[in-house]
Image: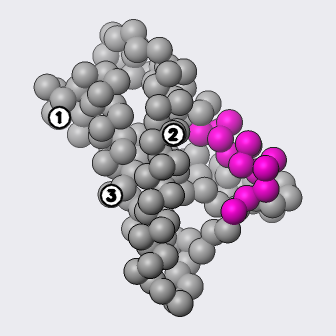
Amino acid sequence: MPMIPSFFAAATYTAIKVGGCYYFGSAVNKKLEQKFPPLKFAFIKVASGFVGGFLFLMAFSALVGERDPSDFEMLLTLFPVRYIIWFFVLGLCYKLFERKPILVFASLLGTLFSYFLDLIMWALFGIFPGMQMGIC
């Protein structure tokens, strides 16, 4: 189970998440011909992911008790939490609740994109001191 990262690792992880979500928000704007500020989207998504990830970690820790699950098991269990966060953030920011098929697909892409950003962090895991896997 992941532990708390160092300040430098947390800042790096946050920068990668904000940058990635900014890119994703820009792509959504272009594809759907909207003008929601990508940086605002990125901060909303990352903050929501942090809160949702923290709550998930608390619940997950209570469920597994003393057992030490693998990161893979935890990240797999996290999938629905991430999907729900992407669903609501995309739906609110881009007013996609009326366009359910697009919202469902974009939320799935966003969820998978979150895992891609985690892969970047995993690649940096052994390089930066205090680096731990994120769950946001």
> Label 3 vs label 2: CA separation?
17 Å
In the rendered image, the residue lying farthest to the bottom is: 66
Q: Is residue 94 left or right of residue 63?
A: left
In the image, taking residue 69 as reference, residue 79 lies left or right, namely left
Check disc 2: other Cα within 10 Å, few if <14, some if 14-19, many if 20+.
Answer: some
Q: Position of residue 72 (x, y in %)?
A: 52, 71
Residue picked out by circle 1: 101
Residue 63 appears at what percent x and percent y? Answer: 40, 80
What amino acid is labelled 1 in the image? Pro
Task: Note whether residue 22 is visible.
Answer: yes
- The location of residue 23, given as percent across then percent down, is 54, 26
The residue tagged 2 is: 47
Q: Residue at x 45, y 83 (%)?
A: 64
Q: Check whether the beta carbons of the residues at disc 2 and disc 1 lie within 8 A of each other.
A: no
Residues in magenta? 4-17
In space, the residues marked 1 and 3 are separated at their CA atoms by 17 Å
Depth order, front residue of 24/3: 3
- Name the element at disc 3: helix
Mark 3 vs mark 2, foreground winner is 2
Residue at the (52%, 39%) spot, across then down: 46
Image position of 105 with respect to 123: above or below: above
Q: Earlier in the sequence, mark 1 or mark 3?
A: 3
Q: Which residue is mark 3?
A: 80
